[in-house]
Image (spheres, rainbow, N blue to C red):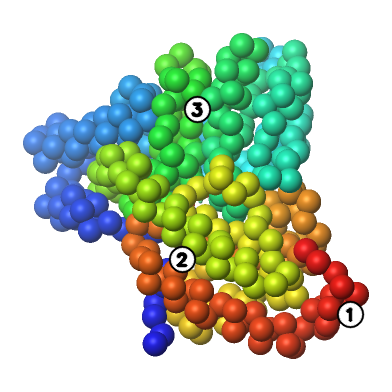
Amino acid sequence: MKRFVYADNSATTKIDKQVLDVMLPWLQEGYGNPSSIYELGREAGFAIQEARAKVAAALGAAPQEIFFTSCGSESDNWALRGAMARLSKKGKKHIITTVFEHHAILHTVQDLERKGFTATYLPVGENGIVNPMDVKNAIREDTGIVSIMYANNEIGTIQPIAEIGAICKEAGVLFHTDAVQAVGNIPIDVKEQNIDLLSLSGHKIHAPKGVGALYVRKGVLLDTFITGGGQERGKRAGTENVASIVALGKAMELAASGIEEKAARLTPMRERLIDGILKIPATRLNGDREKRLPGNVNISIAGVEGESLLLMLDMHGICASSGSACTSGSLDPSHVLLSIGLSHEIAHGSLRLSLGDYNTEEDVDYILEVLPGIVQRLRAMSPLWERMQKNHETV
Ligand SMILES: *Cc1c(COP(=O)(O)O)cnc(C)c1O
């Protein structure tokens, strides 16, 4: 029996019904401008305050430390550009990041390099984890900021954030983390982990697309990101996206309170999926087996092309993702998979399944039922697989 299985929760998530319910009134009767003086406006303003407090509480931050943005990418841009604009005036022009960040970080750092900043891109281990000692050794006199993602969006690996935070604090450099994938999956405490700046996004945690937030520790100075009105304490102008901000507040509240339960439910499902897929010959798991997001499965399947695999899965009603070429519109395979040492060939045949709140054991059964047959069919047509068989190559 064909099913519909959404296993691409790292790409985006469905809006939670409770989240939708709290946001809808702000699109209809509660349409006032939060800056207006009359009650209709003031109520919208209060709703934003309440949402800010919820986001803050979920991170162990204070409400004044939360700034709403339009997405995770904007938060990443603002953190890096805003901080470096200030720091460069004190002669700090060096940025430390990693080779396997999301493009919202990588392309921003590259842009800053073109504008006269310098950058160090730290390698990651074969297990997809950054070594904190590499961070320590890369810090220089002119280092302004270290930006390292909390959990990787492709291979799901969780980074030693508290250790890196402690190193940055000791060295007196800012520490930013892109926590878009971590929020709602891993407990976060910005104070305990010495995080100065943290990016998050609504649509990865069952809120709508087009809203995000940046946590900015009290005392950290950022340049204004959008000049205009006085919204977001004059740092990010533009009439607030009230309904989506309210939704983000609710989603953060739900996410924070459900972390342990979610991990306890998803981890065994992930493990069963990994074990089941690894039974297919010539496959390998990408990223550390334990230090990974509860719902993340990323497996390379030799002799198949990721794009074809996704199309075949789609025909069976399964939404998944791959580190292969065409999806990203480029011929190069995923920079993340290359960073952990995969060859181009193997990286092209990778499959990411990301489980979330709405997945069930039946979804796992169905994927495991359908996938081996698809792999077999694709391999039967693959010259690459034929060559690998002939030469006894493995992954
Ligand atoms: C999705 C994602 C982003 C971008 O967030 P948007 O809200 O889509 O802009 C940034 N970083 C990571 C790790 C992501 O997974």
Between disc 2 and disc 1, the foreground one is 1
Q: How busy is the neighbourhood of tag 1: few (under 14 within 10 Å), some, or many (20 plus)? A: few
Q: Which residue is mark 1?
A: 390
Between disc 3 and disc 1, the foreground one is 1
Residue 365 appears left or right of 106: left
Identified at 54% across, 33% down, the residue is 177
Residue 251 versus residue 159 in the image, above or below = below
* Cβ atoms under marks 3 and 1 closer than 8 Å: no
* Cβ atoms under marks 2 and 1 closer than 8 Å: no
> Gap between marks 3 and 1, in whole Å?
52 Å
* Cβ atoms under marks 2 and 3 closer than 8 Å: no
> Gap between marks 2 and 1, in whole Å?
34 Å
Between disc 2 and disc 3, the foreground one is 2
Q: Amino acid at mark 2?
A: Ala
- Residue 221 at x, y = what percent? 50, 18
Q: Amino acid at mark 1?
A: Lys
Circle 3 — which element?
A: strand
- Residue 163 at x, y = what percent? 59, 23
Q: Amino acid at mark 3?
A: Leu
- Residue 181 at x, y = what percent? 49, 46
Q: Earlier in the sequence, mark 2 or mark 1?
A: 2
Q: How busy is the neighbourhood of tag 2: few (under 14 within 10 Å), some, or many (20 plus)? A: many
Q: Which residue is mark 3?
A: 197
